[in-house]
Structure formats: structure tokens, C-alpha cells
């Protein structure tokens, strides 16, 4: 039974909010990026994305990340999955997953990544993926 507590004061909850995006090319393949040693989790493969910056709107943030990491022009960005967990530092993390399309396969990588591949979902799942990348690829139904 729930009872009313007039002295109850809710605690503030804080989360790190990140985003990942599945970018599909005209052949319905997923863009995978290989992380560089400089960006952490070096040599692992993942999806484009990153953390929201202070006072940033989520759709603006994922567009910024796509531009910074790939320079691809995309269309129809739609959220499709959300994941939350405690990271190794004890921080509460929320990751929003998106999907979108591009007409181009000409990726321009920034310093965060060393390589890229366009792969089917099944091929992508055979790579050495980051945990977040794996979660979103597994949950994606195309």
C-alpha cells in the first residue's frame, strides 16, 4: 500500500545522455566506424554518435555528431531504441538510438575513427563492437 509522506522530497537524478545512429545507404547497409586509439575503445567498431553537450537539443546533437564524424547528408532521422545503464564509473547513462538514410557512401572521417565499412546487420554483428553499438544493431529491424 502506498502512503502519502508529507515530508517526501524527491532527489535530483542526473544522467549522461548519449546517442547512436544507424545510417543506412541505398543498399540498406549500416555504416560502422572503427574507433581510433585517441578516442577510447580503440579498434572497436561502433555507430556514429556521442554525448549531448550542455543545453543541446537531441535532434540537433545527433545531426552534429553525424556531420562531425562522417560529413554525410542524411534524411528522416527517427528514434527507434533507448538504453540505460550504470557505467564503470557509477554514472547513470541513457543512450538514444536513431535510424536514418543517406544517398551517399562517401564518408569523411574525423580524428575519432580510423576506418569505416558499410555492412549488413549480420555482417556488422560479426565485428568487434562496442557494447552500445552491439545493442543498437541487435535491436534494429530493417
Image: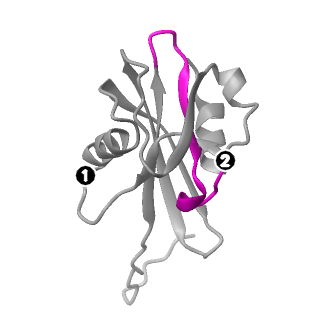
Q: Nearer the viewer, residue 98 or 28?
A: 28
Residue 41 belongs to magenta span: yes
Residue at label 1?
Answer: 57
In the structure shown, which secondary structural element does the residue marked by tag 1 occupy?
loop
Q: Of label 1 and label 2, which has the lower sequence position? A: 2
Residue at label 2?
Answer: 44
Where is residue 42, by image quadrant?
bottom right
Query: How crowded is the residue under tag 2: few (<14 C-alpha within 10 Å), some, or many (20+)?
Result: some
Place of residue 37 in the rendered image (x, y in percent of width and height, measured from the top left): 60, 58
Query: How crowded is the residue under tag 1: few (<14 C-alpha within 10 Å), some, or many (20+)?
Result: few
Does residue 85 lie above or below 44 as drawn? below
Does residue 8 lie above or below 49 as drawn? below
Q: Nearer the viewer, residue 79 or 48?
A: 48
Residue at 63% in and 19% down: 120
Q: Which residues are magenta?
A: 25-43
Q: Is residue 7 left or right of residue 61?
A: right
Residue at 31% in and 39% down: 67
| Disc nearest the viewer among 1 and 2 | 2
Seen as rendered, the residue at the extreme bottom is 7
Q: Quadrant of the N terminus?
A: bottom right
Place of residue 63 in the rendered image (x, y in percent of width and height, measured from the top left): 30, 40
Amino acid at each position: 500500500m502506498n502512503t502519502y509522506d508529507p515530508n517526501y522530497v524527491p532527489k535530483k537524478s542526473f544522467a549522461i545522455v548519449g546517442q547512436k545512429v544507424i545510417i543506412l545507404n541505398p543498399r540498406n547497409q549500416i555504416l560502422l566506424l572503427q574507433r581510433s586509439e585517441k578516442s577510447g575503445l580503440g579498434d572497436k567498431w561502433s555507430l556514429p554518435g556521442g554525448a549531448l553537450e550542455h543545453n543541446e537539443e537531441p535532434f540537433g546533437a545527433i545531426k552534429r555528431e553525424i556531420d562531425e564524424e562522417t560529413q554525410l547528408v542524411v534524411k528522416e532521422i527517427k528514434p527507434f531504441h533507448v538504453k540505460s545503464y550504470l557505467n564503470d564509473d557509477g554514472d547513470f547513462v541513457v543512450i538514444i538510438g536513431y535510424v536514418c538514410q543517406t544517398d551517399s557512401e562517401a564518408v569523411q572521417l574525423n580524428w575519432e575513427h580510423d576506418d569505416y565499412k558499410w555492412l549488413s546487420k549480420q555482417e556488422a554483428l560479426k565485428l568487434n563492437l562496442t557494447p552500445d553499438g552491439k545493442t543498437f544493431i541487435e535491436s534494429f529491424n530493417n
